[in-house]
Every structure is written in C-alpha cells, then in structure tokens.
Image (cartoon, helix red, strand yellow):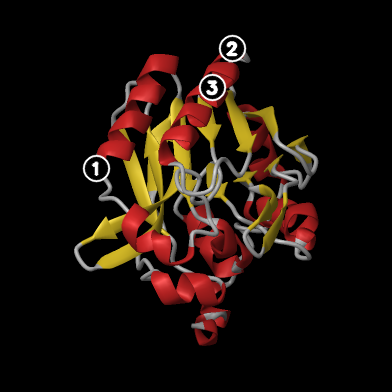
Amino acid sequence: MPPLRTALLQSSGQLGDVAANLKALDEAAARAAAAGAGLLVAPEMFLTGYAIGADVARLAEPADGPSAREAAAVAARQGLAIAYGYPERDGDAVYNSARLVGADGALLANYRKTHLYGGFEQEWFTPGDQPVVQAEVGGVRVGLMICYDVEFPENVRAHALAGTDLLLVPTALMHPARIVADSVVPVRAFENQLYIAYANRTGPEGGFEFVGLSALAGPDGTARARAGRGEDLVVGDADPELLRRSRGENPYLRDRRPALYTTLA
C-alpha cells in the first residue's frame, strides 16, 4: 500500500470570517494537491476562528450546513480528503467538532471534542461522548481527535487498540504549552505505534497566542514533517509499510497487561 501523503495547514485564518477561511482552505487544498497530498488537515475551529467568544452561538452550523457543503465542494474540486475544525450546532447544543470529507466530497466522519479546555470551551461547548471515530482514506485507517484530547494517554491508546493508523488532530495549542507539540505528540505516536497529524493555529488571536509547531509524528517518535511558528503548509508521508515494520519491532501493545489497569477507570 503506498504512503498517504498528508499536508498540515498551519494558520489561524480570519477571525469570524467564514467565507475568507473557506477561501483559504481552498487555496491550501490546491497547494497540497499540487504537492501530491491525498489528505489535508486544518486546525481546530478553522472555519470561524477560535477566539470568537459569544459569537460561537451565531457562527455555529449544523454538521451538514452551508459551510460543510462548501468544504465538501473544495475537497471534490481539489481532489483530496480534508479534515477541518468548526463549531457544530445540534439542537440547543454546540460542539467543538472536526469533520472529515473524502476526495469526492462525501462525508467520512464527524467528531466532537471530548475533553474541553479552559473557560471559553467549557462555557460555550458541550463535550462529545464518542472517543473513537474512524474512517478510511487511501487505504489508511484514520481517526479524529481535537487538541486537548491528545494530551490524555487513554484517548490515544483507545485509538491504537481500535486499529487507527493515522490520528488527525486539528489543534489550537497556546503559549506556553509548546511541550505538547515538541514532545508529547511524538511520544504519543511512539508509545501507541501510529502516526499523528497535529495541525495547529499560529500567532496572536484575541487573548490567545498560538505556538504553531504543527507536526506529522511517526511511530518511531520523530517528526516526519514539522512547521515553525508562522503560517505554513507542511507535507509528509504516513507510510503503512514503515508502520507495519515498526509495530513488529515495538512490543508495547503486545506486552500490555490489561487486568492490572482496571483501577485506572
């Protein structure tokens, strides 16, 4: 099976301007496709901006709303799968969500952030309750998480046990927590024997300062692609053959003793 070339968009887009962010997504998708990518991952809350405060109630849309249809059209027009973050309205609830559409524009998966970070998220969002959401892209089993979720080892281990090969993590990691991008994400990939595509926002926005440092981390614990602090589009390969060999050599999942861990929950 050939590698799945994966592009990470590191950008904060335009705060509160959905049309401008959809245009930026289209432009990034065109660049990613020209680089041979079959998948583009955009950051958390990319369609609206993150620091939107009470505007989250106005900007949130249903999972199949007009912005979702336009993002699907972008994927079909550029010929690659796209994952992106957005605020999702479902009845009276609003979720911090990530949506994955295929290269034909078809919905592949929708994930609702399970671990909400800080006062803004806890005030305006409802936590999701489905920890493992998966789909297939180019023969690779991909899973979805959002930002803070990946910092909980149980979350990533659940994906590893469910057979996820590439974990997509739209992110809004803030200063001074760059240790997550520098160290935690590569370690999560190593200890769970999977790839992690960690696509972050960058620069100042409202009262936040995003650190960038997006990365495609491999099962060997290295960053196969890494952005700096500014706006960027980086590309790397999620290689099923490398993953197969690494899983054969790394015994973590085989050597687990689940009966000893029951008190953790």
24 vs 186, left or right, is: left
Q: Residues within 10 Å of mark 2 (few under 14, many from 20)?
A: few
Q: Nearer the viewer, mark 3 or mark 1?
A: 3
| Observer-nearest of 128 and 187 | 128
Q: Residue at x 53, y 48 (%)?
A: 15
Q: Can the viewer see residue 57?
A: yes
Quadrant of the rendered image containing residue 34: top right
Up-down: is 187 above or below 167? Answer: below
Location of residue 138 in the rendering, given as x and y in whole percent from the top left corner: 45, 25
Q: Residue furthest bottom?
A: 263
Residue 72 image point, x, y percent:
34, 29
Residue topped by disc 1: 64
Q: Secondary structure at mark 3?
A: helix
User: Residue 255 lies in what quarter of the image?
Assistant: bottom right
User: Type of residue at label 2?
Assistant: Ala
Q: Report the residue marked by disc 2.
A: 34
Q: Position of residue 223 (x, y in %)?
A: 77, 41
Q: Give the total of numbered labels.
A: 3
For mark 3, what is the residue? Answer: 27
Lower sequence index among marks 2 and 1: 2
